[in-house]
Image: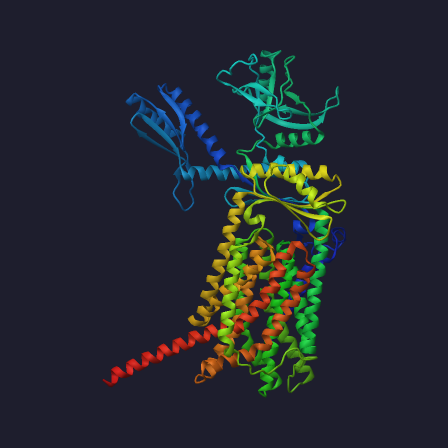
Amino acid sequence: MRTPRWVMATYAIIILAGILAALPNLFTSQQLASMPAWFPKQQVTLGLDLRGGSHLVLEVDAKALKADRLRSLLDEARGVLRRERIAVQSARVVDDGVNINISDETQRARALEVLKGLTNPVGGGFAAPRPDVEIAATGNRVRLSLTEAGLSDRLDAALQQSLEIVRQRVDQVGVAEPTIQRVGSDRILVQLPGLQDPSKLRELLGSTAKMTFHLLANIPQGEQLPRGVSLLPDAKTGQTYPIEDRIALDGERLTDARAGFDQRSNEPIVSFRFDSVGARQFADITKENVGRPFAIVLDGKVLSAPVIREPITGGSGQISGSFTVEDTAVLSALLRAGALPAPLTVIEERTVGPDLGGDVIRMGLFTGLAGFGLVVALMVVLYRGWGLIANVALGLNVILTLGVLSVIGATLTLPGIAGIILGIGLAVDANILINERIREETRRGASAFEALDHGFKRAYSTIVDANVTSLIVTALLFMFGSGPVRGFAITMMLGIAISMFTAVTIVKILMIEVVRRRKLKTLRIEPLFKIAPEKTSISFMRARFLGIGVSILLSIASIGLFIKPGLNYGIDFMGGIQVEVATSQPADLAQLRERLGALGLGEVALQNIGGDRSVLIRVQRQDGGEAAQTAAVERLKAEIAQIDPAATIERSEVVGPKVSGELAWSGVLAVVLASLAMLVYIWWRFEWNFAIGAIATLVLDTTKTVGFFAITGLDFNLTAIAALLTIIGYSVNDKVVVYDRMRENLRLYKKMPLRQLIDMSINQVLTRCIYTSLVTFLCILPMAVWGGSAVANFAIPMVFGIVVATTSSIFIAAPILLLLGNWWRARQERADAEVGERVAV
């Protein structure tokens, strides 16, 4: 029971380092700047839901990239064959390749050799390089096909280039502390704190910004367009111009672009400058085409089409039109950063206003402190002074969690705060297990040090098993979740890991020190007043059929509710638009519904949230993909501004069909994998019948939770999946404690009837089950009551799940184990009898 001094010193260093790392979060940035150089400056980064800002996920248009590659491959093939004087009957793009017809066999063989020069090896590393283009001949036809390796390499290069261009564009508009990073093989995540209306930025990031200069064709009105001429619309008015397809000058020759004002008319303009080659080409074009209109085209739209009045030899020019100052700022930023290799589509957008973010921070702190205060009070009630030691460990747990979050640069979100709060409840579970074990040892007549030693040893394996099941769930949440859900998983994992240090190691050292200093002979842990009876002898197995039957009926009813009326799926899974609006006066929902319904955006649902001036507007997923979604949200915001000019958009979310499908699949996969992981772990740690009992109970608990979502109408979204997985983890956690006591008693009382042994085991852990559930319930209750809509679909189901998980451990998991155990014993007895009969014969 003695801890070496070097171990004590190590623990002290860890605690001091954690406190020091957490301290910067108590100061403002200005205060930290005046601190000594040795003082840590790293703070926990607040997520966008806490400080306000915009979150956008951009996807590279792989189809456009592929089409562009095929066009360039066709041009390259034509150029090579022309230089080699190989006669070509036809050359065109067909499906995923280029078909070239060559009638002469000798020239066809020569063409195969020449065209091989267009291929490039891609890949490498552990795999052998592969060509990006495959060339094959069939009859008169030579086909150049794009390979998967080539497309993948081109997509990777395009994404890397797009990442740099997006970073430059964001820097051009001066957004502070942006987060721009690659996500997967074809996506870019952009997070911009403090930006409330991302419409201009969406336009800035989504524009390809491919700028070209073309001459206008002289086509009399009403005549048919000849080959090589296309009608392109004006970017502002929609008027069309007959533009020559041939590019007179490419925008890649631009070296600079600046927003400014015309000195004569004082209208906003964009001035630009070419490099030396571009300046020479621009001078030649303007000399040869004086008096002709010269169109400046950006992404297929005409910005302006001025008439060339005189040769321009200085290598610079200007773009004018019906521009606003903001338009010229965006356009100049686009041109300075350069063109994207392929279009970027906004497939997910989430925006939180800064005022709402401040309210969320206050609410998170309030509910967190309230939950912590309730837990601290209950621990004192349950264990008096020994409860204070557990509370010291809880405080250290929170401080060290914040310290680690600061050091690793993690982002704290509202679900992350919920994870810290829930982690407090799970950390207390370990202290309750330890204190209850020590109580049992004291009742058996053990001395103070003996009770401490045995109590910690016997509780340790249960604590490890319970925490491992929780870690399995949180690891899956991190793997399959996104954004705030991952933040919840990180804080939960840290809280669980740190609780193994604070709730076990630190508490043990403090309790030993108290016993040693007070020279206690007996360690008595008594409550201020009794909440639950300490010794019970209830025959729970008498009601086993009733418990299982009621549970099955509730699960069947939940499945019925899942079918009809069904779950209220959030936009994470259904896609669509969700906007939270704060109106200047009490909202007239009927008027809003009528005006917004007339926009032709499909089904529009409205509801008041948190007061009569706060309205949640939901619009169904739009046909036409992500571009239609983006256009719809702009129309929606414009109409809201017309109805109530003083209204503010507190929060907006736009999720495209592709993202919603992926999120739905990830959520289902996470739940299934969590259940399978639990089955494997319990099977490994206990026996097959324990694992089957736990999974059967888990299925019943999960279906009832799904039924709860259906009957309450809470949003079923990513946060709801986090709640469902957390309930699964908590449910198995609770069952592990009961199973651990049963396993221990099976070793001690080998001759005892299974039914009697199970009843005895449940009675022994009943107090612990009640206390742990009560602590976790009180921990999450303030968030369920005062947390608001942002966490309602996490906190409220958690309160329900705690009750369901605790009762199912006693009235479902244990009876299933009894039925399986009796069946197995009867089978073994029959097998033994058959062996005895054969031996007798």
Q: From the viewer's perspective, is 271 left or right of 95?
A: right
The residue drawn where x is 74% and y is 39% is 645
Residue 432 visible in rendering: yes
Residue positioned most to the left: 841
- The answer to whether residue 218 is left or right of residue 152 is right
Q: Where residue 272 appears, x then y in whole percent?
A: 65, 25
Q: Is residue 649 left or right of residue 543?
A: right
**Residue 380 sits in quarter:** bottom right
Report whether 465 appears left or right of 179: left
- State whether residue 821 is above or below residue 199: below
Which of the pair 380/393 is nearer the observer?
380
Q: Nearer the viewer, residue 748 or 716?
A: 716
In the image, residue 490 sits, relative to residue 252, either above or below, namely below
Which quadrant of the rendered structure holds the N terminus?
A: bottom right
Residue at coordinates 66% horizontally, 23% vertically from top-left?
Answer: 319
* Residue 161: x %, y % from top left: 54, 37
Colour option used: rainbow
Residue 173 in percent (x, y) is at 67, 36
Q: Is residue 39 above or below residue 262?
A: below
* Residue 841 x, y percent position in the rendering: 22, 84
Using the rendered view, name the quadrant where residue 340 is placed: top right
Viewer-closest of 188 and 539 = 539
* Figure disc tally: 0
Q: Nearer the viewer, residue 673 or 19?
A: 673
The reply to whether residue 461 is in sight is no
